[in-house]
Image: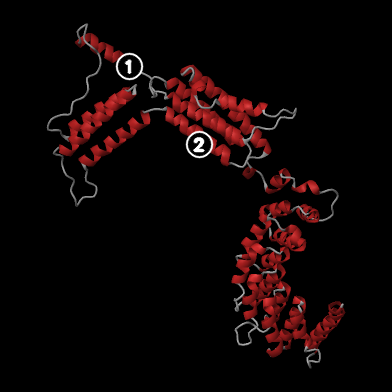
Amino acid sequence: MSNGDDDPADASEEADAADDGGDAGESTETAAPTLPDDATEESLNEYLDEIADRLDAAETEADLDDVEALLDDAEAGIEEADLPEPDEDDEDADDPRADLEDRIAELRDGVEDARGPYGEDVVDAVETAAERVEETEWTADGRDDVAAAVTSFVGKAADAIDEAAPGAIDEADEDPEALLDEAADGEESDAAEPTSVDQLVAALDAVAAAVADADFDADDDADVIAALLEATDGLDADLDDAEEWDDLETHEQLRAQGYYDVLGHYKDFPVEWAALKEHEARGNVDMILLALDSLQSEFMERHCLEAFERMGKRGKTEASVEEVLGRAEKRDRPAIRILGKMAAEEATDTLVEYVDEDSNPQLQKAVFKALGEIGASAAVQPLANQLDPDGDTDELVRPHAARALGLIGDTRAVKPLADALEAHPSDDVRAAAGWALRQIGTREALEAVADYADERSFVVSTEGEKAKRALDDAEPAATA
């Protein structure tokens, strides 16, 4: 525990008292205070004054234990004492019992403040630093500074532990300095790799384990505990100074991650847009995602999403699908269009949920087309249900459902499409059903459309004529 400086005046008074009242062989140590019988408010306060003096003079954990025991006695004495009770009708009336209990609480806080520090405090501080090193996103320069800070701390800590407990480091499961030395020597090439975060954390964990194994005593090993805590304070200060990504402005983060490296001579402004176009041309999906995440402007967000839509399947990665699908789950139509262009099968379940949203025709149109482009066979029946003329689906939406079925190309859609072609009251729906059947392209599907080559409706007959030609072209091949 930490020791206070002795007051020279107090020391002089104690010496005078010893000379005046004590025998030559009598101890000058202050006797422990005694709890008064039939205690009063005044005597209890005097008793607490004596305990406070002993707390100020305490030098060891044992001294503090004695003070705690005296406070326990004082607390019991206050409970048993016949003290005046405050007037319940007077809010400002004094309450001697409460005042004494408050003093005891303050003295107990003082005991806790005076205790330690302990080896456990060092372990906690080192483990907290290790967690910070591991969880913080450092820049390249910051990581170098962190490595230097940890290396310096590990050296100081190892020296302090060795001096106080020789052999403690050697007996530990892992030598923290050896871990860092291995990291430095692990690369045989001339250009040594920087020490990894995992290696730095392992070294700090090894220091914490060595301190715990040393089992330092708060009294006997106060100096080494203080030295280790001073070293951890220095480590914390160095970590505070190391550069984190969050410390950088957005354009600095982008520059550090190479976003602008693709730029040569450019004429578009802002430069972020010019770089985005180049990343799109090169298929740099990660950089487009970086811009989308970092550049919080509607202008750049729109252009990033448009880049993904133009890239289509080239822009499909696990990360890009996750990002766009998250937006689609909020019924974002541009994101839904992108998922279709990417042919992202991962989006099927989400998009199928939106097929029946009859109150939002624009959303339905985007969803139907995306499901068609994905080729989502799971959507065949939900889309076929949209062709029902007695349903609630907007008439302008039904042709989009038919076309989506054609894009999917699943033969299970032939019958509902043929039924729509035959009986639906809307020529637009019938023509879309004919187009979809031609996309499916089986003989059954083509024959169902070819029957309407002489249809009175021009848009329907056009699909019928195309289907008839397709059958005619296929006939020689079938004959051969």
**Which picture quadrant has residue 438?**
bottom right
Q: Tag 1, which secondary structure?
A: helix
**Residue 315 coordinates in the image, percent (x, y):** 74, 58
Disc 2 designates what residue?
Answer: 128
Q: Tag 2, which secondary structure?
A: helix
**Residue 92 coordinates in the image, percent (x, y):** 24, 47
Q: Which of marks 1 and 2 is in front?
A: 2
The quadrant the N terminus occupies is top left
Q: In this view, does 107 lie to the left or right of 171?
A: left
**Which picture quadrant has residue 49?**
top left
Disc 1 designates what residue?
Answer: 9
Residue sitting at 18 percent across and 48 percent down?
87
Residue sitting at 55 percent across and 38 percent down?
132
**Residue 108 coordinates in the image, percent (x, y):** 30, 34
**Residue 148 coordinates in the image, percent (x, y):** 63, 29
Foreground residue among 384 and 300? 384
